[in-house]
Image (cartoon, rainbow, N blue to C red):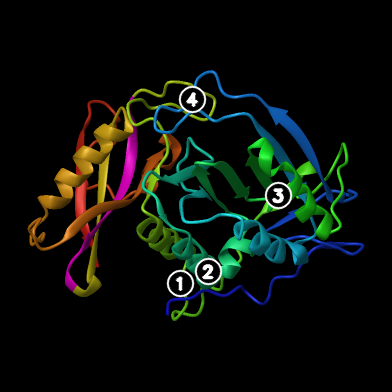
Amino acid sequence: MSRCAVDTSLKRHLIGDFQFPLGVYPVEDMEPKPGYTMVFEPADADADAEFEEWPDRYVFDIVMSHQRLEPFCRQLFSLFKGRVFPILDVLGRDDFREIDPYIAYDLIGMDRFLECLRRYRDFFYEDGLCGFGVMTEEPFFYAFVDEHKIVTIRAEPHMKERIEALLRSFDLEPREDPAGADATAHEHRGVLNSADESLLTFDQIVEDLRDEWRLLLNIDPTNNVDDEGKDLGNTIWHCVARFMGDEGRRRYAEVIVAAGALEEAERMAMDAAEALPKAPPPDDADLILVAIDRVAPDRVGELQIPKGESADPEPSRIISSRWLE
């Protein structure tokens, strides 16, 4: 079975008896404060069109010492039954977006979600570059562990007492100011051992999770804006396409395009990959994009753009494509 492991040279940050994840830790003096806040949120007036309107719910934001996180999550996820929508956030490589938010739009069995948690335990519970969670619509129930390893739960009112009982069982009490690594200046880092070629890298795990959980990038594909909502117009996009054939055989291609929206960049990248010499026909291999990241002007020079080809983002076009051997 494919697996991962932490880099054993990394040291865990401790303040008193409070342990931080290996992948996120404060860089200023602070006082960690385990506990949680709880607020009531009324039903949404305008919901995401892809999902039902979120009903009245209680929201819990929970801080705990790291050694308690995995046991707590095992108990929390045991409250989910049947089929669920997995969620994955990744601090990615897009120069205009801090987090790549992935979500499943098709239900999968909770057993598949839990199996991935077991398989990639160190990635989920230690790495400071990812967050993960799960949700259901009927009943509405949402649980997410962010990249700081702070837990957020959203649940309908009838589940409030059950969640409070779970929190008490871990000696977590309500307080106005719970404080983890995100309460002060802090650093994020990847923690996986990349020297051992028998272990999966961060990118390989994300790719596998996208397959296992049927994840899609949860952003508006029709525009091109940064995290502040600024319209970027056309930008350069670096894309990696994957052909997967029989018995899981994979081949990867790099495509660089200029485009003004995600859907335009995806379409051109797929067309360019299919047009490569010796590209397998559609009936013989599935083609997906495993990476599609915008590149800032000051980093375009790092790309392998053919000599004589302009790196200007205008007009929209395919700039280059090549096999990655």
Q: Earlier in the sequence, mark 1 or mark 3?
A: 3
The residue under label 4 is which amino acid type?
Ala
Q: Is residue 59 left or right of residue 172?
A: left
Q: Nearer the viewer, mark 4 or mark 3?
A: 4
Q: Is residue 243 magenta?
A: yes
**Residue bounds of the magenta highlight:** 234-246
Residue at left offset 32%, top offset 34% = 262
**Residue 309 in sight:** no
Q: Is 79 covered by the magenta stretch?
A: no
Classify mark 4: residues with Cα within 10 Å, few (<14), some (14-19) or many (20+): few
Please give the residue where the numbered disc 4 appears in the rendered image.
47
Q: Name the mark on residue 120.
A: 2
Tell me, for residue 200, which label it has, or none: 1
78 or 224: nearer the viewer: 78
Number of on-image labels: 4
Could you say where residue 32 lies in the image, as x and y percent from the top left? 87, 51
Helix, strand or loop for disc 4: loop
Which residue is disc 3 drawn over? 150
